[in-house]
Image: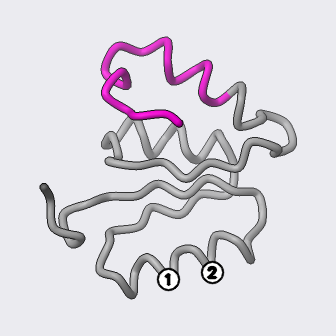
Amino acid sequence: MKEAKDVEILIVDDSTTNVVLIEAVLSEMGYKIIPTLNAKEAYKAINKNIPDLILLDLLMPRISGYDFLKEIKKNDKNQKIFRL
């Protein structure tokens, strides 16, 4: 099992407040955080490096969290991303 400092968590939420709060809590616990405010930013982040965990707002404008999930599932390299 990885230590917190070795775990990357991608946050995808259109609410800046939510992103800042979640980032503060998880950073304090030692996790590496990749904050994004929309699906477009999240796609770019995933193309650079696949995170260990994605915390995703499903109800976002333009590209919803549901559509984001559908899109990343199409790429084989993203198949290791666990979804609940």
What segment carries the magenta color? Answer: 68-84
The answer to which of 37 and 30 lies nearer the viewer is 30
Name which quarter of the figure residue 17 lies in: bottom right
The answer to which of 9 and 39 lies nearer the viewer is 9
**Snapshot colouring:** one colour
Please check the rendered image and state whether residue 80 is part of the magenta-colored stretch, yes or no. yes
Residue at image coords 70%, 37%: 65
Residue 63 percent coordinates (x, y): 77, 33
Residue lying farthest to the right in this orientation: 61
Question: Are the residues at dot 1 and dot 2 in contact (C-beta closer than 8 Å)?
Answer: yes
Q: Secondary structure at mark 2?
A: helix
Q: Residues within 10 Å of mark 2 (few under 14, many from 20)?
A: few
Residue at image coords 62%, 78%: 20
- Residue occupied by mark 1: 25
Residue at image coords 65%, 41%: 39
**Is 6 situated above or below 76?**
below
The type of residue carrying mark 2 is Leu
**Is 36 situated above or below 16?**
above
Residue 25 percent coordinates (x, y): 49, 82
- Residue occupied by mark 2: 21
C-alpha separation, residue under disc 1 versus residue under disc 2 = 6 Å
